[in-house]
Image (cartoon, rainbow, N blue to C red):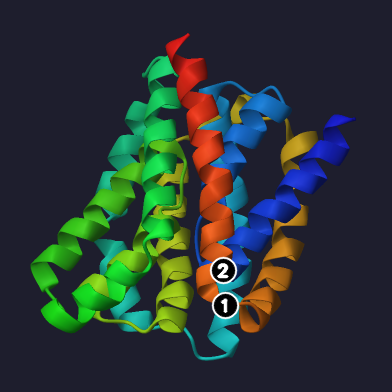
Amino acid sequence: MSALILALIAGAVVGLALGALGGGGSVLAVPALIYLLGFTAAAATTASLIIVTATSLTALFAHARTGDVRWRAGGLFAAAGLLPAAAAGAAASRLPQPVLTAAFAAVAALSAVRMLRPGRAATGAAAGGTRPVRAVGTGAGLGALTGLLGVGGGFLAVPSLVTVLAFEMRAAVGTSLLVISVNSLAALATRGATTSGIDWAVVGPFAGAAILGAWDGKRLAAKATGALLQRAFAVVLLAVAAFMLVDALT
């Protein structure tokens, strides 16, 4: 199968995840770029940021049209991650490829576990309410993950917005796309030198398919239950994480 076809298929899946779940697309984009399209770990994380930024902005627009974005709270949450995202993005190019791969696998596994336990978020929101200090700390942590691993952080942002800021699920999904967009742009700003080796003939179609998939993901989210989507995605993600961890350690 040609690289173009693989890029289009992978991009569509990434877009569906971002549009439907408000996150998770980047944790599929990086392994797809590495194992299907032959990118190095460093190049894959940079390319993932480009793809996720374009796709998240598109999905953000779709969710904003239906009033599912909390702009002020999401902006504050994202602002806390700006400096960590920029700093981690600058450091990422200096790390060995096996370290990046293993770290990414660990984050992917954490994402899958969180998605398999969706009930915890609602309980935490009801019990704890909004905690500004915790919100800032969570936002900073998401920013660092974005810069280091090329992930938007939506798979952690959604449960954090529900738990820390007491958002309902639809608002959390929409607002997480704002957080992803801001963090990804900040991380990309420090990776200018690493974009020179990007294969745009692959990344361009990948991003285009992801953007189209994000619109379909938004429609899918309106038809299927969030719990069902999350469980299916989590199972795939656990398999990806296991494969990447084995690859990093062998």
Residues at marks 1 and 2, CA–CA distance in whole angstroms: 5 Å
* Left or right of 186, for residue 233: right
Q: Residues within 10 Å of mark 2 (few under 14, many from 20)?
A: few
**Residue shown at the point (28%, 63%) measured from the top left:** 79
* Amino acid, disc 2: Leu
User: 78 and 163: which one is in front?
Assistant: 163
Contact, CB < 8 Å: mark 1 with mark 2?
Answer: yes
Quadrant in which residue 164 is drawn: bottom left
SS at mark 2 in the image: helix
**Residue shown at the point (32%, 50%) measured from the top left:** 143
| Image quarter in which the N terminus is found | top right
**Residue shown at the point (38%, 40%) measured from the top left:** 107
Q: Residues within 10 Å of mark 1 (few under 14, many from 20)?
A: few
User: 44 and 248: which one is in front?
Assistant: 248
**Residue shown at the point (34%, 71%) measured from the top left:** 119
The disc label shown at residue 191, or none = none
* Left or right of 105, for residue 32: right
The x, y position of residue 78, in whole percent, is 32, 64
The residue labelled by disc 2 is: 228
Q: How many marks?
A: 2
- Against 200, residue 49 (above or below) is below
- Against 92, residue 30 (above or below) is below
Q: Residue furthest bottom?
A: 67
Quadrant in which residue 163 is drawn: bottom left
Quadrant in which residue 86 is drawn: top left
The disc label shown at residue 225, or none = 1
* Left or right of 32, for residue 102: left
* Amino acid, disc 1: Thr
SS at mark 1 in the image: loop
* Residue 20 shows in this picture: yes
